[in-house]
Image (cartoon, rainbow, N blue to C red):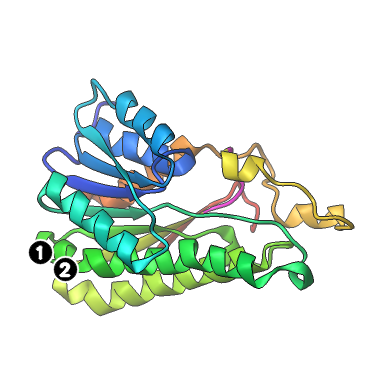
Amino acid sequence: MTMDRFKGRSALVTGGASGIGRCTALRLAEEGAAVVAVDVNAEALAFVAAEADGLTGSVTALVGDVSTEEGVRAIMSGALATLGTLDVLANVAGVLSFSHAHEVTLEEWNRLLAVNLTGTFLMCRESIPHLLASKGNIVNLASTASHAGQPWAVAYSATKGGVLAMTRELAVEYAEQGLRCNSVSPGAIDTPITLSFSLPEGANPKLLRRVTPLGPFGTPEGIAAAIAFIASDEATHMNGADLRMDGATLS
């Protein structure tokens, strides 16, 4: 079935060079959106923009860093110069590390906090005035780590728990003004960030059951499809919600 739910609309997708971000940018463009995809990886980002050739919509590459206030302001300026308006913000950019909690360095903690939580906040903050004007919406990427204890991911879990709480707060604060904010919580998805996983030294392999789906790993295309649904008019009554997609990991 061919859909054009985003024809004539604009979207900004962070983490757009690979994995879920790449698939989200391409899915929205496939459905007609003019998309600006943001990432720090310029080479991979240019490839994603080229992949969009021939789609109903378009993907424009914009190199940017969501972890700093200056970087986010530059992203918003560049995106609005390309798009003119903004209807959808998809906050997908994220980093992950695996360590025993007692071995996590402050540098590692701060890096995950800056990208995953502060970056999501800054992108939301700078986008909200434009999304209020367009009656648009935000889709944040949370995680199953937002909902249950996951081993070797203390910093990641803390950041994604914050993303989930922030999503609900924004939904409540801006609902009457016509802005929606929702999140998706993936479990194990077949992406480069997941495939980089390795057990910390001395880790108990039994704890892998806490993060392993009962069936196969999910696909980034599947998460992108969920993001597209949430961001579309088909989900206009969905606000402050989180869609868990984890293959029954937490069931």
SS category of the residue bearing label 2: helix
Give x and y (percent) for residue 214: 69, 44
Q: Amino acid at mark 2?
A: Pro
The disc placed on residue 129 is: 2
Image quadrant in which the C terminus is located: bottom right
Q: Amino acid at mark 1?
A: Ala
Q: Nearer the viewer, residue 180 or 40?
A: 40
The disc placed on residue 133 is: 1
Give x and y (percent) for residue 174: 22, 75
Q: Is any part of residue 87 visible from this angle?
A: no
Q: Tag 1: Cα neighbours inside 10 Å, few (<14), some, or many (≥20)?
A: some
The image shows a total of numbered marks equal to 2
Determine which quarter of the picture holds residue 237.
bottom left
Residue sitting at the far right: 202
Q: Which residues are magenta?
A: 186-190
Q: Nearer the viewer, residue 125 or 208?
A: 125
SS category of the residue bearing label 1: helix
Q: Do tag 1 and tag 2 residues touch (Cβ < 8 Å)?
A: yes
Give x and y (percent) for residue 243: 45, 57
- Per the image, is 189 magenta? yes
Q: Tag 2: Cα neighbours inside 10 Å, few (<14), some, or many (≥20)?
A: few
Give x and y (percent) for residue 6: 19, 41
x 31%, y 74%: residue: 170
x 58%, y 59%: residue: 144
